[in-house]
Each structure stands twice: as C-alpha cells, then as structure tokens.
Amino acid sequence: MICWLTVNRACNMRCNWCYAKADNFSSVSTMTSIVFEKILSAISSTSIKKFILIGGEPTLHNQLPSMINRLKPAKVLLVTNAVKLADKKYLKLLIDNGLDMVTVSLKGATEEQYKQNTGVACLKSVEKAVANLNDFKINYSISVTFSSSIMTTLPMVLDWMKSTNAKVMSINYCRPVVLDNKVSIKEVPHPKEMAQKTIDSYEMIKSSGVRCVYNFLLPLCLLPIEFINELLSKDLLTTVCQLQTNNGLIFMPDGNLVPCNHLFEYSLGKLGVDFNTNTEFEKFRKKDEIISFYQKTQNLPDVRCKQCNLQKHCGGGCFIQYLQYDSSEIIIKPFIERR
C-alpha cells in the first residue's frame, strides 16, 4: 500500500496545468502536526510501504523534516519543484531525517519556459538542486508531464538533463481535472496526441542515454504491441493507477481522504468524522459504499477491453479521461484482434 500525504497547498509557482489551482494555493491549507499524527494513528494497521509527500509545494511546509523522520521505517518519496533544494543544508537536513527518494517536477528547459509555464524564472535554482542531489547521491528522477506546453520541448529537456548530469526521467501524462463539478482540460492534449508523441520521441530519448520510465495511464491500444513489449522488457512502462488496484490512500491537508489527486474535491471520508482510530479506519474501508466506489472505478471503459490480451496491464487507462472523452474516441481494437 502507498500513501500520498498532501501536506500543503501553498506553492512558489503557478503552473498553467496545475490540478490544485482550485485551492488558490492557500497558505492556510496546511496539514498540522495534529492532523498528521492522527492520520498516522488511523492508518497504523494498514501496511504502508511507501509515503509520497506532495503539495502544493511540500518543501514550504516548515515541519517537513520532522514529518519525514516520523514516517520511517517506510520509504519516503518527496515530489517537489526543487527550488528549495538549491539550499544544500536544507537538502541534507531532509536526507538526515530519512528521505529516500526525490522526484523533481521539471516545468521547462529554459528560464523563459519556466517564466511562461510557472510565472517564475527559477531554472538556475533547479539546476543547483540537481547538482546537490548528485553530490548526495540520493535516488532521484526528473518528472516531465506531457502537457500542451511541455510536450513539444522534449529535445530541449533532454539537452538540459545532459548538461546537469541527470540520468533518470519519468514521463507523466496530463489528465482532466474535476473542478467545481466541471471537467477541466486546460493544457491537456488529446490522448492520441500524447501516445503518438511517446512513440515519435522514443528513439531520441533512448539515444540520449537517459533512462526514461513512462507512467502510461492511457489505453495501451494507442501504442503498437511491439513498442509495448520493448518497454515492458526493459522495465520502462508503468500502467494502472492506485484506483484501479485499490492499493493507495490520498490524504488532503485537512484529513480528507480523496480517491485521486485529480478528484480532490470528492471526499471518500474525513478524519475525525468518519474514522479516528485504526479499527474505525479498517471498518470504514470495508463499508459497502467504499467498496462500491472502487468497483466502479475498476470497471472497464469499453466492452472491447474484455477481449484484450493486455487488459491486466491497462484496464482502459485512467478512468478520469472518460469524463471528457467517449471510449470510442480513444479505445482502438483490442490486441487479441490485432494479431
């Protein structure tokens, strides 16, 4: 089981595609030490192997080092824009408290792109952070989201990675966000466009020497079977999300348990209302309405998916995309028919 802790909503950037815009990056929306400890108590009977700390921008939380220390011995991954990691003493403090891994969310490959995409020209700080990560030899990766703004700049991103000696990249795929009960697709390319970009850029990425892992939460039938097999054989492809496998928990700063970062306005339950103790949390997870919700998210989006040889690897991709697109728009023939 993996647990995401959204420790705050404050951020020092204003990314065009950010799914957390609806919270207005509020500095008030911050996980207190009391809520943090109560969450840990509630999930203490749940086998959490890894915690992922997200925001907002989690490094703006003044209790982040002690939070990391408290989460041990589980693995702790920090997802960050890395600006504060330019401070080598601060990064060392996080590592000394038990930080295991860092995902650096890259917003562009030039200062101009950063200014355009985030409102802040801070690439030099990110470069200093990567240098610090290299010096400390901590496991880290550069995360790139295929948004309309970033997708076309991939060659520049690879050049930037070479210049900073960053060796590992992960590609994520921009997805719709539900805000005020409306589906927002700002900066979200069509799934077919993102899939084609994945195919077209593969040889370029491979020849760069960068190890690239594709977090492909789109229907696998958008890719050629030979391409899929190559990625799988090299352990470069991850598919299906925690909603499809029911192996994740996501807590918001106020203790709300939400199903997905892109559905953060939808509460499954709340700390202090629906559960407090670990026994209450276990009972809550077994409620009919919770089980029913996860069953619905695991439904295949198209009847043709039932025939597909890759169904277990795919499940039709992230179900949120079907809030915007009909399955007929993005599901091609299942692989069993394409032999």
Image (cartoon, rainbow, N blue to C red):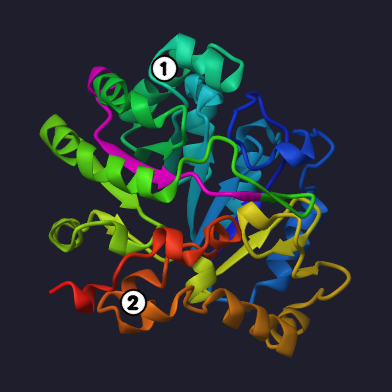
Picture quadrant of residue 307:
bottom left
Question: Tag on residue 210?
Answer: none
Crowd around label 2: few <14 · some 14–19 · many ≥20 (10 Å): some
Name the mark nearer the viewer: 1 or 2: 2
The spot of residue 172 in percent (x, y) is 41, 45
Q: Quadrant of the C terminus?
A: bottom left
Is 168 part of what is drawn in magenta?
Answer: yes
Q: Which type of secondary structure does the marked residue at label 1 adopt?
A: helix
Q: Is residue 276 above or below residue 89?
A: below
Is 153 part of what is drawn in magenta?
Answer: no
The spot of residue 74 in percent (x, y) is 49, 61
Read off the residue under disc 2. 311
Residue plotted at (82% across, 73% down) = 276
In the foreground, 274 or 328: 328
Residue plotted at (88% across, 71% down) = 273
Q: Amino acid at mark 2?
A: Gln
The spot of residue 76 in percent (x, y) is 49, 52
In the foreground, 116 or 9: 116
Q: Is residue 308 above or below residue 105?
A: below
Mark toward the start of the polypeptide (1 vs 2) = 1
Read off the residue under disc 1. 128
Q: Amino acid at mark 1?
A: Lys
The spot of residue 202 in percent (x, y) is 19, 41
Residue plotted at (48% across, 31% down) = 92
Crowd around label 1: few <14 · some 14–19 · many ≥20 (10 Å): some
Left or right: where 75 falls relative to 212: right
Picture quadrant of residue 303:
bottom left
Task: Write the start and end of the magenta stretch as one range.
Answer: 162-177
